[in-house]
Amino acid sequence: MILHILKEPDPRLRIKAKAVEKVDDEIRQLMDDMLETMYNNDGMGLAAPQVGVDKRVIVMDLNAGTNEEPLVFCMANPEVLWASTETETTPQGCLSVPEVHASVTRPAKVNIRYLDRNNQQLEIEADGVLATCVQHEIDHLNGVLFIDYLSRLKQEMIQKKLKKLKKFHPI
Ligand code: NI
């Protein structure tokens, strides 16, 4: 089922989402719906608060939008165990912040612990696109958007743009 994606400044994007007790059929269904919603909107990642669900669940397909085989990650309760001091600056966008792109600097490598679709606890080392994407999605679980990393001036310009967009495309 395709879900509705909340847009900034919706206050539900600013909550700290609740941990999942167990990845059961209900959570797996949520993960599937989130993937479907993500693909439908040409996204690479999506976090449950973006569809109004107060749960620590994220989905990603690192090969979304390419001709490569899907490279899907579904995670519940993802946690950053370690982050490198080395950083990487990458252009970002977000389905909840339409038409805005900006570069954000983050740790280049992170170790992540999470529950997978089968409720198995896994630990992975992430770098490259996975590191960037997983940190962006974990931020959503803590009510943080990528625009929060930008200068105040840039943030004000973005808020004005979003207001205009909302006027022309009520959402
Ligand atoms: Ni996002």
Image (tube, rainbow, N blue to C red):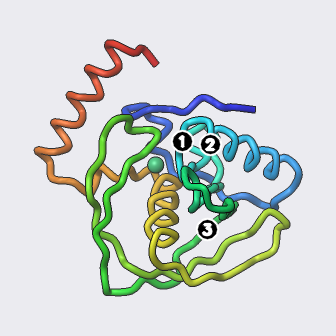
- List x then y, in percent, for residue 91: 31, 58
Q: Residue at x 42, y 14 (%)?
A: 170
- List x then y, in percent, for residue 126: 53, 79
Disc number for residue 42:
1
Q: Which residue is mark 2?
A: 39
SS for callout 2: helix
Q: Which residue is mark 3?
A: 78
Residue 46 relative to residue 83: left or right = right
Of marks 3 and 2, the one in the foreground: 2
Q: Residue at x 50, y 37 (%)?
A: 12
Tell me the quarter of the picture where residue 78 sits.
bottom right
Location of residue 115 with respect to 167 vertically, above or below: below
Tell me the quarter of the picture where residue 60 sits.
bottom right
First in sequence: mark 3 or mark 1? 1
The 10 Å Cα crowd at callout 2, few under 14, some 14 to 19, many 20 or more, is: some
Location of residue 78 with respect to 2 vertically, above or below: below
- List x then y, in percent, for residue 32: 76, 46
Quadrant containing the N terminus in the rendered view: top right
- The three-letter amino acid code for the residue at tag 3 is Pro
Residue 121 relative to residue 153: left or right = right
Q: Are marks 1 and 2 in contact (CB under 8 Å)?
A: yes
